[in-house]
Amino acid sequence: MLKDNQKYKGHRGNFMTFTCIAGLIVGVFSVISDNLPNLSDGVTVFKFVISYLAVMINSLPIWFILAMVVGYIFAKKIRDAVLLGAIYTIAAITFYFVISNIYQDTPVTISFKEEAISYLIWYGASTVGGIIGGCVGFFIKKTPYALLSLLAGLILQLFVNGTSSWNNIVGIAQNITYCLMIGCIVIIYIVIVKFNISLVKRNEERL
């Protein structure tokens, strides 16, 4: 019993550490993404790398993937995936809001009602995304076919970015990254299908 309690505390501690580190990184780079430098007059390697990382980390697929990681690593039951996925995304969006408010030189003046509605929408959407991501990550342990949901999300993100995103170097790099991720998932899917087919044939031959 004591060993189980220690193991549970260690597992919970690892989750909290991951949440704080990943959430802080996501929060920082999401704020940077909202305040990207002007790259039209020329771009240094450092500015390009920072801008690329910021745009990628602040994208919906990466937020979703990190929630998937939580569900995959830390969830032992579907209930855990729901709870931990929601906690992680709430923490990440909270880091984002805190850092964004610190970064702003001049605070935006809006009514309390508008601010409350805005926070409600952001937290609600983030929580739902975290729950779905956590569940997908959990189900990947059961069946790799759950990766197909991420494939659909990446394709959708390319359509959302639109053709205009191919007009700048950061947008091109982001879209190419999504295409590479889509290619990797397709390859994994093909390998899984082939493996399953060969496994079925072997079982039939033995019978």
Image (spheres, rainbow, N blue to C red):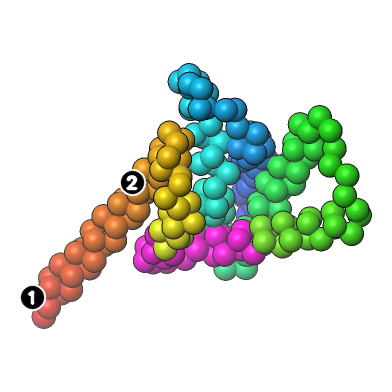
Secondary structure of the residue carrying tag 2 is: helix
Q: Amino acid at mark 1?
A: Glu
Q: State yes or no: residue 189 in magenta.
A: no
The residue that mark 2 highlights is 180
| Helix, strand or loop: magenta stretch | helix
Q: Position of residue 177 (x, y in %)?
A: 39, 43
Q: Is residue 115 visible?
A: yes
Q: Alpha carbon of mark 1 to alpha carbon of mark 2: how far? A: 37 Å
Q: Quadrant of residue 29?
A: top right
Task: Please tell me which residue lies in front, 91 or 161.
Answer: 161
Q: Which residue is mark 1?
A: 205
User: 81 or 94, which lies in front?
Assistant: 94
Is residue 188 something that shows in the picture?
Answer: no
In the image, taking residue 165 as reference, residue 110 lies left or right, namely: right
Q: Closer to the observer: label 1 or label 2?
A: 2
User: Is 9 or 183 nearer to us in this picture?
Assistant: 183
Badge 1 vs badge 2, beta-carbon distance below 8 Å: no
- The residue at the point 15 percent across, 67 percent down is 198
Vertically, is 18 above or below 204? above
Residue at 31 percent of width and 50 percent of height: 184
Q: Is residue 198 left or right of residue 3?
A: left
Does residue 42 lie above or below 117 as drawn? above
Crowd tier of the residue under label 2, counting other residues whose Cα lies within 10 Å: few below 14, some 14–19, many 20 or above: few
Marks 1 and 2, the one that precedes in the sequence = 2
Q: Residue at x 51, y 41 (%)?
A: 56
Magenta span includes 136: yes
Q: Residue at x 50, y 63 (%)?
A: 136
Which residue ends up furthest to the left in the rendered image?
A: 205
Q: Which residues are magenta?
A: 128-151
Dividing the picture into quarters, in which one does residue 207 lie? bottom left
Q: Secondary structure at mark 1?
A: helix
Query: Mark 2: which amino acid?
Result: Leu
